[in-house]
Amino acid sequence: MSTMLKSLQDLRSATEKDPAVPPPPHGVTPAPPPPYGLTPAPPPGYGVTPAPPPPYGVALAPPPGYGVALAPPPGYGVAPAPPPPYGVAPAPPPPYGVTLPPPPPYGVALSPPPPYGVAPAPPPPYGVAHAPPPGYAPPFQPCACGLCDESPLQWMFNLMTRSEEEDAAYPFKVFISNLDRRELLGVASLLTSDPDYFLEIARNKNGSNRLQKLVGKSDDVDNLICDAILYRFLHVMTDKHASYVATRGLRVFAGKKKEFMCEELIHHALLLARDRHGCVALNEMLTDLDHPYYRNQLLDIVAHNALPLSNDTSGNFVVQHVLKLNNPRTMGNVALSLRGHCIDLSFKKYGSYIVERLLEADESVAVVVMELVESNGDRLMRLTRSEYGNYVVNKALKVTQRRKTRVDLFRGLVQKLMPFLTFLRKSRGNNIAVFLESVHQTEVA
């Protein structure tokens, strides 16, 4: 009996010390042991023979989905949108709650920026406060014939610029004479609807002639044309044909329109004087301008800048034209501006014309002759033998001889030239030598 109890205790100790049976988790009551004498149930799969391995050399079947490529993520392979150009600020975010419009499709080019070197629209004309824009463009209406889709702007451009032969069938003058006041205003509005469109017509010879016929038709038409001229004033005045439209406008316009034109003319006077076509337009406006205030301002600008203009290929024509106007005040101012430079100008073709003009006026003859008398002898001799200077010296002698009140100037110049009599013969100064010999013979007799 004691031997059996000892065996049971040994079995129980061995069971408690078996590491294969883990103890229950903390707080979990272990399952009660089976009743005494009952065999516990076998574990799952106990006694089941495992499946035999596949034959040697036979590959195992791939697991499900093996070798199938995964779907690419959204947007895979699509190039990102290019960054904005350098120096261009990104567009600001939309207001809260506003949905942005979708971006353009990939590969569609955005609208290009304006060409490099294209100047922005110029500011309002100088001296014009809040000048109204040129006329408006009427809405598109198809041609009445129904056979063409020519726009009103294209139709008007063709009408204004067609040749004289094409105009003979239905002259433009007859066309505008049959229009009433409202229709005439519509034509002027169409012509001035865009500054560049107006300038393109004015630069055409036939277009310029027909625009001049519209000037003066009514005050409303003149307002639109005046605004269009002021908006592109410098471009209009420096074009051969377009400048005639501005000149015609200055003759016809009155009141504020003429004042605005004069202010622009004064502001750009020196630029126009140095331009090949602008100098011609400026001379015509100086002749026709009947506003004393603006006319005197223009004459003063030319007189005070007579020296640089006299040395300019175009500006010298403006100085010559101003001297032809025979304005005593202006001629005196020009002479003062050119004092000390008359001999230098006399060596040049166009400069010699200006000096000869000064010799014809009482207010400026003394300035020129005194410079000749006080000049260096060698320089005076070179002038008398030069291509253009010999005409200046010859005219100075004849003018002072005729003017009995300037006998002192005549005698001083003769005495200055007499020592060079021998060098003047058989040269470009031969005419001066002949004149000096005749004077000498008269004094001896």
Image: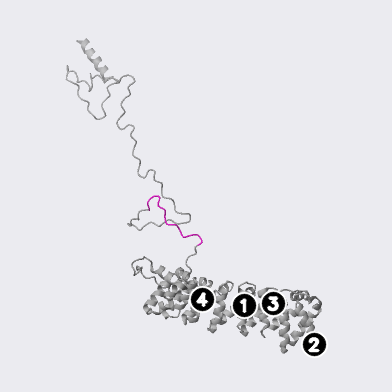
Residue 208 seen from this side: yes
Determine the secondary structure under disc 3.
Answer: helix
Pinpoint residue 8: horizontal percent, then vertical percent.
22, 14
Determine the secondary structure under disc 2.
Answer: helix
Region of the chain picked out in magenta, as a range: 104-117
Taking the spot 68% from the left edge, 80% from the top edge, the residue there is 356
Q: In the image, which is nearer the foreground, mark 3 or mark 4?
A: 4
Determine the secondary structure under disc 1.
Answer: helix
Reading the chain from its start, which is encountered first: label 1 or label 2? 1
Of 166 and 172, which appears nearest the observer? 166
Q: Give me the disc on residue 319.
A: 1
Q: Give me the disc on residue 244.
A: 4
Reading the chain from its start, which is encountered first: label 4 or label 2? 4
Pinpoint residue 29: horizontal percent, then vertical percent.
22, 27
Q: Give me the disc on residue 342.
A: 3
Q: Quadrant of residue 136?
A: bottom left
